[in-house]
């Protein structure tokens, strides 16, 4: 089985930082200052500030969404020893660099002293840059807190060298509140001799619009997205959670494990080379793949959420070719079972060698109409590295996070994947659920996505010259999960008083197996429009007569997923 290791300078597995902060702590010469009843009202408000649930280990938590609750830190008026010295409020662009500056008001510790603090009884310390931080208080309440202990008494620098989304103003500002000291200069951890985990990233098309650089995530311009029924590979959106692995296809092996006798077979494991997979019958399926956070930027306008600020371009439609997962499992003697799961793991690893992971129901994998593919081709071409080379699992009709790239392991199990992305992300919640009340165990992982649509052309803010025929032409896409066909797309420019039905371009596949998207076009008459600006609304209806909700207020959720309200843009008429 393929293994990719990251060299780490730490003598321990590198852990994670930060979740709910209920006991606000600030470094002092006495190592800590605790809250008291005499603290200021502003200071009290910080007790419930939520820090980052950062990528816990052991496969339970591999990456956690950024918690934000009552962020008012920069305006807090602290006094005496609680005041952060103005000399450390320097910024590198918009990023504080406090962790690189020695605090004269705090003591200095060497690595031996820090390593002692590796348990709750002895306090839990970690280091970042030359800062020493005590994170004991929130461990008991942090989901996966036992995994944070793997990083106790150690440096998080190598970990954050990969997860660079942590290096932002909010996280680094809140981190400084936990600072209790300085790391002795001779013990400062360097990541330079790790070799950059980003050194072998593939080249990307310059027209892709990044939502993050490391890991690289990007979407194409909307006008470009709507021009092709099959999205060109180089313009297909990119969603990476970790550095892109560098894989030699000649040495690649896929491990397939049966971990329960409930599957109809004894427990067993076998390895398949890429050549083995290519010798199996080859199938091709058209499937759109959509990120669970697609259109998150629109939901954020209602209330802040945490996650990549995708517009409506985190989706693409392609043909995928490879062996059916069903055939692989049948060859191993697996029989259908509604209670089992198929765990999927990629070759993209965090610094502790834990992979990206997800799972799907065994019933989906075994369904002849489910069309789950172990794909090695995309639109008739070999997969690119950004899209899973040499092997990717395509789960048609299912949220993109289950379409695991760089597939290295499959397991039939009685349980879902225990990875963060299955257990503590990509789940929907009530609009009233916040980071104080959320319980990820109470919500099922997203599988099939809801019906959605988006306008690709024109784009928001365009100035349009109306032709002599008096019509405004609008193009876009629509898609629904679970193989449901799009039956209608409606548009309005008068707030729903009148609707115009679009013409659909789609493949002729049976309902329940209609995994590709639909492109649509509509010509809207505007001769009765007196305004110089119009707002265009689009909504799609699928074969089950599911329809997009009118607004985001009633579907808002703290992770910003399942964002499928009417798509709306404003354009100027010339």
Image: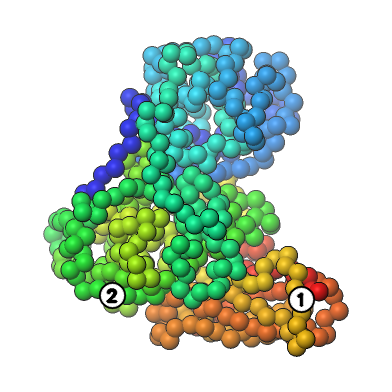
Mark 2 neighbour density, 10 Å: few (under 14) some (14–19) many (20 or more): some
Question: What distance separates the C-alpha of mark 2 from that of mark 1?
Answer: 46 Å
> On the picture, is 89 further left or further right than 479?
right
Q: Secondary structure at mark 2?
A: strand
Residue placed most toward the observer, 94 or 452: 94
Which residue, given by chain and number where applicable, does mark 2 sit on?
283
Q: Give the camera-side residue of 353 and 546.
A: 353
* Image point (75%, 88%), residue name: 469
Q: In this rendering, which labeled residue sits more in front, label 2 or label 1? A: 1
Q: Earlier in the sequence, mark 2 or mark 1?
A: 2
Tell me the number on the disc at residue 465.
1
Q: Residue at x 67, y 38 (%)?
A: 71
Colour basis: rainbow
Residue 215 visible here? yes
Q: Helix, strand, or loop for circle 1?
A: loop
Q: Percent position (x, y) of residue 88? A: 64, 21
Residue 293 screen position, x and y as percent = 53, 58
What residue is drawn where x is 48% and y is 16%?
A: 183
The numbered dot on residue 230 is: none
Q: Position of residue 534 (x, y in %)?
A: 78, 73
Which quarter shows the C terminus? Answer: bottom right
Residue 432 x/y as whole percent: 62, 55
Query: In the rendered view, would you say 60 is above or below 543?
Result: above
Q: Residue 27's image quarter?
A: top right
* Residue drawn at the location 25% of the way across and 69% of the way down: 323
Q: Residue furthest bottom?
A: 469
């Amino acid at each position: 089985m393929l293994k990719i290791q990251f060299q780490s300078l730490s003598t321990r597995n590198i852990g994670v930082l930060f979740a709910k902060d209920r006991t606000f702590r600030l470094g002092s010469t006495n190592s800590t200052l605790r809250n008291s009843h005499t603290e200021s009202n502003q200071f009290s408000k910080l007790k419930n500030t939520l820090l980052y649930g950062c990528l816990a280990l052991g496969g339970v938590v591999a990456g956690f969404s950024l918690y934000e609750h009552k962020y008012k830190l920069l305006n807090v008026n602290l006094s005496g020893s609680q005041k952060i010295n103005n000399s450390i409020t320097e910024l590198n662009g918009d990023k504080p660099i406090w962790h690189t500056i020695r605090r004269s008001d705090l003591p200095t510790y060497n690595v031996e002293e820090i390593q002692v603090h590796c348990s709750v009884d002895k306090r839990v310390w970690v280091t970042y840059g030359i800062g020493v931080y005590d994170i004991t208080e929130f461990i008991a309440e942090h989901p996966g807190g036992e995994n944070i202990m793997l990083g106790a008494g150690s440096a998080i620098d190598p970990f954050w060298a990969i997860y660079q989304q942590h290096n932002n103003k909010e996280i680094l500002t809140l981190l400084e509140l936990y600072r209790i000291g300085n790391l002795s200069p001779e013990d400062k951890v360097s990541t330079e001799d790790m070799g950059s985990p980003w050194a072998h990233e593939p080249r990307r098309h310059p027209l892709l619009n990044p939502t993050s650089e490391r890991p690289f995530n990007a979407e194409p311009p909307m006008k470009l997205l709507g021009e092709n029924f099959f999205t060109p590979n180089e313009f297909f959106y990119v969603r990476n959670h970790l550095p892109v692995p560098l894989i030699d296809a000649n040495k690649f092996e896929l491990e397939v494990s049966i971990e329960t006798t409930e599957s109809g077979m004894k427990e067993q494991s076998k390895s398949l080379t890429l050549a083995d997979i290519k010798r199996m019958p080859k199938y091709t399926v058209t499937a759109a793949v959509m990120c669970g956070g697609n259109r998150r930027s629109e939901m954020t306008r209602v209330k802040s959420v945490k996650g990549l600020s995708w517009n409506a371009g985190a989706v693409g439609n392609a043909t995928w070719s490879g062996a059916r997962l069903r055939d692989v499992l049948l060859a191993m003697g697996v029989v259908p079972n509604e209670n089992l799961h198929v765990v999927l793991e990629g070759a993209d690893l965090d610094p502790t060698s834990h992979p990206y992971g997800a799972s799907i129901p065994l019933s989906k994998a075994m369904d002849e109409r489910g069309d789950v593919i172990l794909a090695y081709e995309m639109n008739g071409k070999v997969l690119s590295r950004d899209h899973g080379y040499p092997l990717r699992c395509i789960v048609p009709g299912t949220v993109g996070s289950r379409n695991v790239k760089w597939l290295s392991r499959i397991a039939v199990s009685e349980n879902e994947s225990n990875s963060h992305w299955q257990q503590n992300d990509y789940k929907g919640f009530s609009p009233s659920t916040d980071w104080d009340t959320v319980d990820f165990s109470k919500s099922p992982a997203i599988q099939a996505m809801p019906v959605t649509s988006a306008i690709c052309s024109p784009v928001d803010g365009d100035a349009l010259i109306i032709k002599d025929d008096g019509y405004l032409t609008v193009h876009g896409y629509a898609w629904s999960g679970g193989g449901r066909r799009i039956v209608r797309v409606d548009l309005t420019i008068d707030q729903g008083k009148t609707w115009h039905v679009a013409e659909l371009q789609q493949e002729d596949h049976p309902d329940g197996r209609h995994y590709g998207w639909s492109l649509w076009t509509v010509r809207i008459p505007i001769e009765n429009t007196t305004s110089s600006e119009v707002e265009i609304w689009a909504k799609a209806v699928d074969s089950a007569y599911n329809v997009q909700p009118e607004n985001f207020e009633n579907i808002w959720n703290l992770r910003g997923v399942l964002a499928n309200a009417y798509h709306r843009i404003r354009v100027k008429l010339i």
